[in-house]
Amino acid sequence: MPASKSKKKRFIEAEDITRFSLIKSIALSPDEKRVAYTVQNVSDNKRKYYSRLHVADCHTGETRQYTFGEIADRDPVWSPDGRQIAFVSTRDEKTAIYVIPTGGGAERKVLEKDGSFAGLTWTPDGGELVFAFRQNDPREETDDEKKKKEPPLYRHITTLLYKFDGEGFLPQDKYHIWKVDVESGQDKQLTRGQYNDFCPDVSPDGRRIVYTSNRVSGDAINRSYFDLFLIPVNGGRPKKIPTPPGPALFPSFSPDGKKIAYHGHDRPDLPWGIINQHVWLVGTSGRPEARDLTPRFDRFAAELTISDLGGGLVLSRPFWSADGKRVYFIASDLGSSHLFYAPARGGLPTRVTQKKCHVSFCSMNGRGKKAAVLYSDVNNTTEIHLLPAVHHGDKKAEKIVRPDRRLLAGINQPKTREIWFKGHDGFELQGWLVTPPNFNRRRKYPAILEIHGGPQLQYGFTFFHEMKYLASHGYVVFYTNPRGGQGRGRTFVEAIYASWGEIDYMDCMSAADYLEKLPYVNKNRIGVTGGSYGGFMTNWMIGHTDRFRAAVTQRSVVNLVSKYGTGDVGVAFSRIFDGHPWEKPEIYKKHSPLTYAKNIKTPLLIIHSENDLRCNIGQAEELFTTLKVLKKKVEFVRFPGEPHGLSRGGRPDRRIARLEWILKWFDKYLK
């Protein structure tokens, strides 16, 4: 009989963001034989996300789903004996801590409270769970569901830190450290006051809890000031551990309980991202004194690789080896996010993962022989890999969980390749070029230049649905890392200090030059787009050049003065631009894209979310109004109810609509 024809592979579609099964959190078991994880899926009506708890056998790869239904599970943690998994779950709009037996059986609710849980961890005896919790503001008791969702009569604001993008208006209560008895459900608040207490960790002997807290007046402005505190596990007077001024985040006890590793730096006067954040070590009594474990490591110790499927600006607790001689962490480097370890005595770190990849999270369990990592690369969405926690550990990595393997096998993916090209001054710049499926070098394709947000983030070796979607519709897509971003050291980041729109603009134009010179690109049909800082740069570029045939600006910065006063972290611009707007009005005006809007000739689509608290919707309104009055080609698409991160975590149907609008605009002007 004739062999059957293989099924023709399809191209990537906008709706694929609703088809991917994305792993969102992982936890390696105490015996390193199993890994617990949550998988996020989208509801049939494309309006909600659900995530359920699974467990995989690290030897066989066999997976088992533990929870079911229209729920949102997150942050699993194994009990010390490996017999239970605790996790946080939201069900019917109520959030609670649950535990489930790993040998089989239904989950059991331990504690339900009206608020937000974070930093869930077990005590060493397995009897209690310690966590941070913030109570929601009290609501009027009513049986009317519609009335329950109505806003309050008014909001009385007394502090700058009253809203945060993705969370909305913050409640009056602060995060505090709590604990709960797993069997009885009896809970106890351990810290109090008008300060946020985060990131608890319990000492190996179960007697103390370390946590981080910002006790500096005016914490909305002084967001880089966090200190470490110790309290007895049953509560008591907090004891401050001496550390240098600056952030002290995600503390982790050493195996002997005498030292604490944490993420931090000692230059809180500088803008976020300028100084490299590293893993530091301090004795629980302040002796030995706090010190940077890797002072000569010119990289930022955090996961800073951008993707529309997750990642970017992720901090997690450092992990210790069982003998206390090594500390593990993730750092961003040349487009990759890698797992590293540093000697506890200090020195240069060693890289565990070597492949060009995106490690967005790691889980270790105290034995320190293996690490479970959340892994992706340019051709694969989130996967769980188990690897030896040694140099070149990924050479022996086992691919434990690959939920999208079959889906991706049926897709003709555009090819993504790393590119190094020269800036206007000869400086080497990094980028990624995506070519359409069934690419033909003899054709002339329209092209799109994409610019990342941050700016202290990086594009990298990760799966980026948007880039592949646009390429699948016949575009050559180029996304690059101009100066000002992360992954190449402090000097690279500092290049745009108080000078957005200068050398970074030249780097972006060098990327456009590179595109124009490609023999298969139609140099008269190149578009540009970006979001947040990438939206700033899109606005800036079309206000300074007519080379682009079309542009799409998203959740963008338009006016630095109004951004300062309306964004949830807008006051941080006083450090980014070396002063407040009333102190440096000429700087704020010079570096605002709105100043140059009168020069714009490029047809512009403005996309913005109405609940964006990072770059307020007023930014888009100012630009749209100005361009309309000037009779420019401009259209405005607003997404109700969505935050700044629409492209990464907005309602699925709105994420699809956003992609379709971008494609429609470029098709109109570039094809």
Image: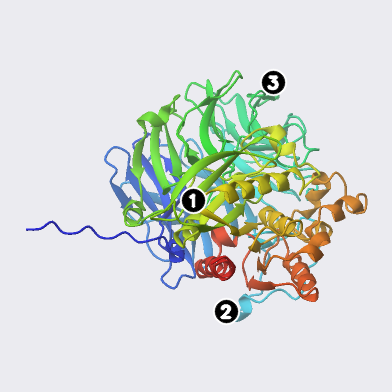
For the point 53% across and 38% down, the residue is 336
For the point 53% across and 54% down, the residue is 521
Q: What's the distance in space between the residues labelled 1 and 2, CA to CA?
A: 48 Å
Q: Earlier in the sequence, mark 2 or mark 3?
A: 2
Q: What's the distance in space between the residues labelled 3 and 1, CA to CA?
A: 52 Å
Q: Please give the residue where the numbered disc 1 appears in the rendered image.
A: 434
Q: Please give the residue where the numbered disc 2 appears in the rendered image.
A: 145
> In the structure shown, which secondary structural element does the residue marked by tag 3 occupy?
loop
Amino acid at the residue labelled 2? Glu
> In the structure shown, which secondary structural element does the residue marked by tag 2 occupy?
helix
Q: Position of residue 6 (x, y in %)?
A: 22, 57
Q: Earlier in the sequence, mark 3 or mark 1?
A: 3
Residue placed most toward the observer, 404 or 57: 404
Q: Position of residue 194 (x, y in %)?
A: 76, 51
The answer to whether the residues at label 2 and label 3 have Cβ atoms under 8 Å apart is no
Amino acid at the residue labelled 3? Arg
Badge 1: how crowded within 10 Å, few (<14), some, or many (20+)? many
Q: Quadrant of residue 391?
A: top left
Image-based side of 189 in relation to 29, left or right: right
Closer to the eye: label 3 or 1: 1
Q: Quadrant of residue 276?
A: top right
Amino acid at the residue labelled 1? Val
Badge 2: how crowded within 10 Å, few (<14), some, or many (20+)? few
Q: Position of residue 555 (x, y in %)?
A: 67, 61
For the point 69% across and 20% down, the residue is 287
Q: Please give the residue where the numbered disc 3 appears in the rendered image.
A: 287
Badge 3: how crowded within 10 Å, few (<14), some, or many (20+)? few
Q: Quadrant of the N terminus?
A: bottom left
